[in-house]
Each structure stands twice: as C-alpha cells, then as structure tokens.
Amino acid sequence: WRACVCLYSPGSRQCCSMSLLDHRSIMQDATEGPLQIDGATLEGGGQVIRTSLSLAFLQPSRPLRLHSIRAGRPKPGLANQHLVGARLAAALSGRALTGDDKGSTELVAAAHEERPLPPSLEAAAETAGAVTLML
C-alpha cells in the first residue's frame, strides 16, 4: 500500500494528474518508518496539511513528519488556521504534536497514544477560516 497526499479516484490508475516520477518524491512505503510528507507538494497550501493529518488517522502506530510546509507561498509555514486544524486533529487522534508553532515549516505528529477524547473541543483560528477547512 502506498500513501499519497492526493485524493485517489477509484478505478483510475493514478490518484491525480501528477506523473509517477513526481509521486515517487512524495510517496513512501507505508510499512517503514514515519510517514514523510512534503508540504510543498502540488499547490503547497493548507490542503496538503489537512490531507496528511487525515492519512495519519489511517496509520495510528506510525508518526507523521510533514516538512516544507507552504514552502512556495509568500508567507511560508503554518498560519493560525492551520495550527488550529492540526491541534484539533491531534486531539481527536490521540497524537502529540511538535513544531506546532506559527510560521513553523515542519510538523511532527507522534504515534497514537491511547487516551480519552476531551469532553469538548474549542477552536479559535483568530483569522478568516472555515470550520470545514480546519478539519
């Protein structure tokens, strides 16, 4: 099984319009080490962050390392809305985050640890951001 930051379309031979060579640079065999995701992939925006954290839900025993976050953007790194979304996802998945600071270009989500879900979750993006884009 291979992990890709793109959305896979069932029945197609490829999950997106990227070439196989491009995919090799962002894919890794899902049985080895941490999931490594290049945050500058495709448009290099928040979608890569959200999709990567979603992939981490599917592989709870493996850490996730997301690097080069928004590297090609005018303001690289995590913005407030990305931080809030990452922290919500971490709380829901029982993962601890490192690098979850504004402007950080690397985010590491540790492997899942059994812990109860918080009784409630609160998110304050402090900037324009839709709830649907935080999770």
Image (cartoon, rainbow, N blue to C red):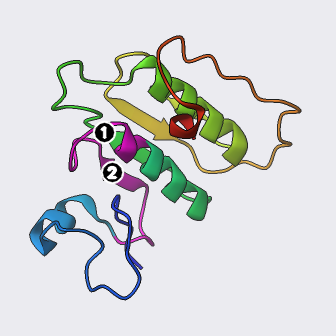
| Quadrant (top left, top right, bottom left, bottom right) of the C terminus | top right
What residue lies at 18% left-to-right and 68% top-to-bottom? 17
Label 2 packing within 10 angstroms: few (<14), some (14-19), many (20+): many
**The N terminus lies in which quarter of the figure?**
bottom left
Q: Residue at x 38, y 65 (%)?
A: 7
Q: Nearer the viewer, residue 86 or 126?
A: 126
| Separation of residues labelled 2 and 1 (CA atoms) | 6 Å
- Magenta region includes residue 38: yes
Depicted 14 relative to depicted 72: above or below: below
Q: Is residue 92 magenta?
A: no
For the record, the magenta segment spans 29-49
Is 122 in front, or is 27? 122
Where is mark 2, residue-wise? 37
Q: How many marks?
A: 2
Q: Main secondary structure of the magenta part?
A: loop
x, y percentage for residue 105? 31, 28
Question: What is the secondary structure assignment of the residue under circle 2?
Answer: strand
Report whether 31 appears left or right of 124: left
Q: Could you tell me residue 115's position as x and y percent?
A: 82, 44
Residue 59 in sight here: no
**Residue at the limit of the structure toward the top, as seen here:** 126
| Cβ–Cβ under 8 Å for marks 2 and 1 | yes
Comparing 133 with 122, the one in front is 133
What residue do we see at 40% from left, 20% from top?
79
Q: Which residue is mark 1?
A: 67
Q: Is residue 103 visible?
A: yes
- Is 11 left, or right, of 43 in this rendering? right
94 sits left or right of 25 in the view: right
Sequence-wise, the earlier of marks 2 and 1 is 2
